[in-house]
């Protein structure tokens, strides 16, 4: 924007000087024409030849300077005009060169910028490829580490299984008395933990005095679906009593306005499968304590057999019941085993005492 304005200012200055000189030239020219006209007029009307000749020479001498000035002005104006034209052409040429240089610089800058962008993109692409390669290497290394850990874990599991197998082979099976003692200790520990968690130490001074019903689960019973088939086993002891791998213990604590029921399910085949439940019922919600005889299909040596099972049930008003199987006797084949928790235990006395407590609390 500054270049055109500069040219306009220069042209205006030149035009102003030019106009001033032209006006001066015109002034002398008019004066010369006027004098010339006066001379010719005087020459025509004059009768004195000497005077006319003198006046002629006088006018000629007088007009030499204006004529010189006029010719000088015309020559100078012509030279100035040519010089101005040359300057204008030179300025245009310089402006054109400057514009070309500017365009060239702009193209060079754009080319450098494009090269820089291309270089940056190439560097970014290389960085991304490097990152991807590093990630792939890390993933491969991670997979290798996981594979090594898996192999080590499998090796440890094999070693542990081998040690367990050796330990099982070296450790003699427990006796009937040791198994009974283990069951009693396990259920007493669970009962003591429940009493402590509920804060009943002051109310239950002797847990042995609580009413208790013990049951079992065999393959084919309605509750057998809650356990793995390989965990449902039984064995006849040397003392003539049968022991079971799944044992259910149900304790009853009659409080003032409600009855509390603690249930413990002990799996002798899998010690981690230990279950305990705590329930509370108001006495008006309890219908009664009963024993019921049902027909069941028990699996003896993998074959279904008909049995009459006796179950203890604490029935509630909503239709549910807390139950446990206490006896199982074959219906068709007399040679089949008879299942009982303890032939000497009297479940009927326990039920009768529980019914008495319920009647007293309800009354």
Image (cartoon, rainbow, N blue to C red):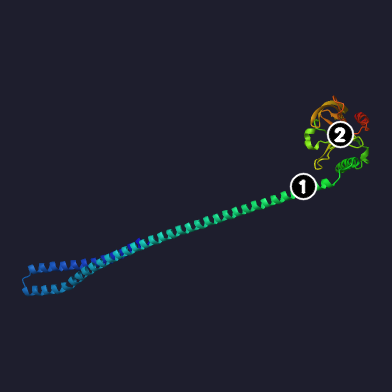
| Closest to the observer, 80 or 314 | 314
Question: Viewer-nearest of labels 1 and 2?
Answer: 1
Q: Quadrant of residue 59?
A: bottom left
| Closest to the observer, 203 or 267 | 267
| Closest to the observer, 127 or 65 | 127
Is label 2 in a helix, a strand or a loop? strand
Tell me, yes or no, if residue 199 can be seen here: no
Report crowding for label 1: few under 14, some 14 to 19, many 20 or more residues within 10 A (C-alpha).
few
Report crowding for label 2: few under 14, some 14 to 19, many 20 or more residues within 10 A (C-alpha).
many
- Checking the image for residue 203, the label placed there is none
Q: Write down the residue under mark 2.
A: 215
| Closest to the observer, 97 or 298 | 298
Of the residues under marks 1 and 2, which one precedes in the sequence? 1
Q: Where in the figure is residue 37, as x and y percent of width and height?
A: 13, 66
Q: Where in the figure is residue 332, as x and y percent of width and height?
A: 85, 24
Tell me, yes or no, if residue 147 can be seen here: yes
């Amino acid at each position: 924007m500054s270049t055109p304005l500069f040219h306009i200012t220069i042209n205006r200055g030149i035009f102003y000087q030019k106009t001033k000189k032209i006006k001066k030239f015109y002034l002398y020219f008019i004066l010369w024409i006027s004098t010339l006209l006066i001379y010719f007029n005087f020459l025509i009307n004059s009768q004195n030849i000497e005077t006319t000749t003198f006046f002629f020479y006088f006018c000629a001498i007088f007009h030499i300077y204006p004529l010189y000035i006029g010719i000088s002005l015309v020559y100078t104006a012509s030279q100035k005009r040519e010089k101005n034209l040359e300057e204008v052409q030179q300025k245009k040429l310089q402006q054109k060169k400057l514009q070309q240089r500017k365009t060239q610089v702009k193209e060079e800058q754009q080319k450098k910028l494009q090269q820089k962008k291309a270089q940056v993109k190439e560097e970014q692409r290389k960085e991304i490829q490097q990152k991807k390669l590093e990630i792939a290497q890390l993933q491969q290394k991670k997979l290798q580490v996981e594979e090594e850990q898996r192999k080590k874990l499998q090796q440890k599991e094999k070693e542990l299984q081998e040690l367990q197998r050796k330990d099982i082979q070296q450790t003699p099976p427990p006796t009937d008395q040791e198994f009974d003692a283990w069951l009693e200790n396990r259920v007493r520990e669970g009962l003591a933990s429940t009493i402590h968690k509920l804060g009943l130490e002051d109310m239950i001074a002797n847990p042995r005095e609580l009413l208790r019903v013990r049951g079992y689960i065999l393959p084919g019973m309605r509750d057998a679906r809650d356990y793995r088939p390989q965990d449902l086993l039984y064995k006849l002891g040397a003392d003539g009593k049968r022991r079971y791998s799944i044992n259910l213990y149900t304790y009853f604590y009659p409080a003032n306005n409600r009855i509390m029921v603690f249930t413990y399910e002990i799996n002798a085949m899998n010690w981690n499968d230990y279950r305990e439940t705590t329930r509370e019922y108001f006495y008006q919600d309890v219908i009664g304590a009963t024993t019921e005889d049902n027909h069941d299909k028990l699996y003896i040596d993998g074959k279904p057999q008909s049995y009459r099972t006796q179950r203890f049930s604490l029935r509630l008003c909503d239709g549910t019941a807390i139950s446990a199987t206490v006896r199982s006797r074959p219906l068709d084949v007399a040679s089949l085993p008879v299942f009982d928790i303890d032939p000497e235990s009297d479940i009927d006395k326990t039920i009768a005492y529980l019914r008495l407590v319920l009647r007293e609390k309800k009354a």
